[in-house]
Amino acid sequence: MNFNTLLSSKYFAPLFWTQFLGAFNDNVYKNALIILVTMNAASYTSISVELLIPLSGGIFILPFFLFSALAGQLADKYEKARLIRYVKMGEINIMILAALGFYLENIWFLLAVLFFMGCQSSLFGPVKYSILPQHLTEEGLLKGNAMIELGTFLAILLGTLLGGILILEGELGRVYVSITVVSVALLGWFASRKIPLAESANENLIINWNIFTETWNIIVSSTDSRLIFGAIIAISWFWFVGATMLSVLPLPVFTQDVLHAKEQVITLLLALFSIGVGVGSIVAGKSATLKKSVKWIVVGAIGISLTAIDLYWISNQLMTDNLLKNVNELSTWQALFNDPMTAHVLFSVLLLGVSGGLYIVPLYVILQEHSAIESRSRTIAANNIINSLFMVVSALFTMMLLDNGFSLPQLFALIGFLNLAVFTFLYWRFSVTVKQVIG
């Protein structure tokens, strides 16, 4: 099965477009909201922009802690295609509320909508990944996960761009965003109607509605298998590194002090990273079997460390050698690529994304193929909870280092060496188990 066949398959294409449109819509709304808050915070609330933007991120990620355990139980108990359609119907209603929030220009109402969006995304996560093994072979599962990762990062990029473009269209910006998010939610629901049935994995499961005890239960259960828990920690570490890098690359101090370019270069950095993840995912997905794909985890992990350390070296050169005099001297993308030093930075960001794609795809397949069928969705829910925890720690870690005088080049170097140390530990701790189970 090749990628073209997969994208035309009735067992994968509807899920791919449902996921793509959902991720796209999330980021249209989130970026439009962030820009709206940035431009008009003083007129909406007395809270500073510096607090509102991190607050927005926290509001979106909180539901993953609260409701992933419930989502995992629902996905294990009920038929998955129908559950996805219910979730997408919820997205339509949430986006109608978003349109009302933009009309009212009420920042707190819009933040509440952001929380509901996080709830919808947390419900979709376990069923999205647990339905794939029911519809795809092992080779198809590798390619399917590769396409899901490619689609997700491209959707994030395109949604972020469109949200920013639309909200900046003066008074009509909020109208354009409202029409877009409701329309895309409808398209996502129509796509979900084509997803083939995927029978219940555990129809006799009794739902535990206490989200706190069940969250603890599924995290503890995920430790029963060394292979599964190792994959969860390895995936979560990827999101720690990715969240850290993506939080500092768009900072003005990086674009101005390192690249000496205008802030529009942020779009280019995000595009290169997203394209890189897509390329890496496709390469890893070309493997015929999971056993053959495992090598890419090692290659990806080493690549992440080498590119992070390389970013330290080249960024330090650009900052200390004072090679560029004017902050806006490199005002176009072409100028950035034509300058050898800044082109080096851009190439490293691309390779960072490629390494991430190589690393992450086989790990998701390990999680899907080797988790128990009757509890697979709850295992993926445990992964989502721990991923979210690592991302929150990443944000606190980054803020602490930058507040205590770390430069961006030093942060890159630290991430590179930390990644090498963590992966070496994970390889030592779990590689024997991987070889025993996968062969």
Image (cartoon, rainbow, N blue to C red):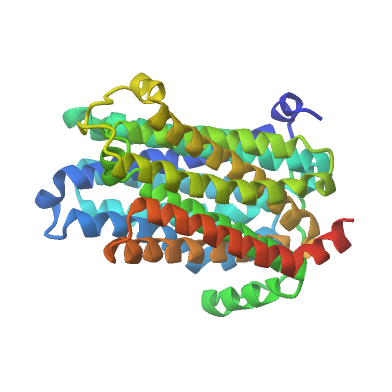
The image quarter containing residue 395 is bottom left
Tally the numbered discs: 0
**In this picture, is 1 found above or below 219?**
above
Q: Residue at x 74, y 30 (%)?
A: 6
Residue 58 position, x and y percent, is 37, 61
Q: Residue at x 73, y 31 (%)?
A: 10
**In this picture, is 244 found above or below 99?**
below
Q: Left or right: where does residue 431 sit relative to residue 156?
A: right
Q: Quadrant of the N terminus?
A: top right
Q: Left or right: where does residue 268 sit relative to residue 137?
A: left
Q: Residue at x 79, y 38 (%)?
A: 287
Res 9 seen here: yes
Front residue of 91/302: it is 302
Front residue of 339/173: it is 339
Residue projecting furthest to the front: 321
Q: Quadrant of the C terminus?
A: bottom right
Residue 20 position, x and y percent, is 54, 37
The image quarter containing residue 404 is bottom left
Q: Residue at x 72, y 63 (%)?
A: 427
Front residue of 188/45: it is 45
Residue 108 position, x and y percent, is 24, 56
Residue 210 position, x and y percent, is 54, 77
